[in-house]
Amino acid sequence: MKKLLAIILLIGLTSITSLSAQEIIQTKVLKEIQEYNGEDFVVNVTDILFKNDHIFFSDQGLTSILKTDAELNFISKFGEQGMGPNEMEKPEFLFNTEGSSNLLVLDTRQRKLLEYSQDGKLIGSPSTLEASLIRHPFLHASVFYYKSALDRTADLKAYDFRNKKFLTDINFKGDFRESILGRDIHPFKNQFISVVNYSPPIIEMFNEEWEIIDAFDLSENPTIAKRVAYKKNSDIKLSGSGQSQVKPVASGVVIIKCSRFYKNKLYLLTSTMDGREDTIINKIFTYQFQNNTWVQKEQINLPEESSYSTFALLDNRRIVAFEWENSTIQLLELVR
């Protein structure tokens, strides 16, 4: 009898653990804005950075960096538009400089890095990068890594922005996945996490020597697997046995629009395209590295009838996201 009770208790605990490992979280819009300061409307936010209780937005439509507090109240706007040495044309990415209150802005059109104080003052002179078309940039310590899309000789270029010098090019080693849409790379302890964005998305892990040591197929996620396997009827007709049949083709595409690594947890903003209709999965999936594999922890359901392209975490209960169809910025609460 005691043995039977122990087995029942073990099954119960296993079930609880399984459920908690894939917690479903709803979201509630706390605030949304369509303009920053009564003059500048939200146009096209390509990146969001939360630093020292302030939120920074790179808005390509305004060719500016906008700063608000954590409640989306406008504080300032900075960045000079133009082609001059201290000006920018396409501010696409924002980076947090470690050990400094400053932030880096990547202008992908002029291929240069600009360092600003949080008050919007340009620090030093911008750095020009060796690149034709920049893909999957990231910052680790004082080294800025990026892919030059038309350069077939290197998987990543490395630039020490503090000392303003280029380092040795990097080439991945092992059986890694090529990705036409690039990859998001996040430093993790003595390793690097690579999120291959295009369908079916995967998580790769590289060591310090850029050798691939593991890969995790995200199509094991039931929601993603269902979308990847989606089939629609093509316009191709097959004749046989006296009957014409329409050939079905696989057309489910899953794309990771944005990924963030926050407190040892990977957050993946996912969208899909199904057949002739662009169907957005308004979900953020979270994964954590446990027992040498990636385990899905949460499914964050974003508001329906919205389409998000980028987001940032403010803390464990709030995120800020750009909803691109209506050009709005939303402050969202995670309802657990």
Image (cartoon, rainbow, N blue to C red):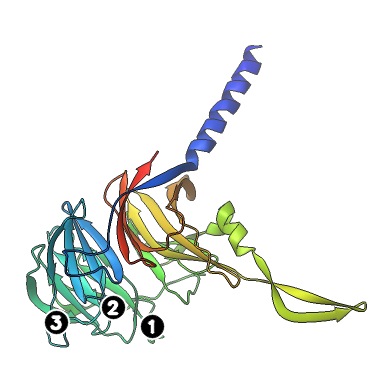
Depth check: give the residue in front, 88 or 220: 88
Numbered circle sitting on residue 149: 1
Identify the mark nearer the N-term, 3 or 1: 3
Q: Amino acid at mark 1?
A: Ala
Q: Nearer the viewer, mark 3 or mark 2?
A: 3
User: For mark 1, does the 10 Å Cα neighbourhood hold few (<14), some (14 to 19), or many (20 or more) residues?
Assistant: some
Q: CA distance from mark 1 to mark 2?
A: 17 Å
Nearer to the camera, 218 or 314: 314
Quarter that holds the N terminus? top right
Q: Position of residue 178 (x, y in %)?
A: 49, 74
Mark 2: amino acid: Thr
Query: Relative to 174, is 305 above or below?
Result: above
Label 1 or label 2, whichever comes before in sequence order:
1
The answer to whether residue 192 is seen in the rendering is no
- State the separation of the CA atoms marked 3 and 1: 24 Å
Q: Is residue 291 above or below residue 164?
A: above
Q: Quadrant of the C terminus?
A: top left
Q: What is the crowding at mark 2: few (fewer than 14 residues within 10 Å), some, or many (at least 20)? A: few
Q: Position of residue 41 (x, y in %)?
A: 23, 69
Residue 272 appears left or right of 41: right
Which residue does the image show at 17% across and 88% down from the upper left? Answer: 83
At 60% from the left edge and 27% from the top edge, which residue is drawn?
A: 11
Graded by Cα atoms within 10 Å as few (under 14), some (14 to 19) or many (20 or more), the crowding at tag 3 reads some
User: Circle 2 is placed at which residue position?
Assistant: 168
**What is the C-alpha distance between the residues marked 3 and 2?**
28 Å
The tag on residue 219 is none
Which of discs 1 and 2 lies nearer the camera? The answer is: 1
Residue drawn at the location 37% of the way across and 81% of the way down? 154
Label 3 sits on residue:
87
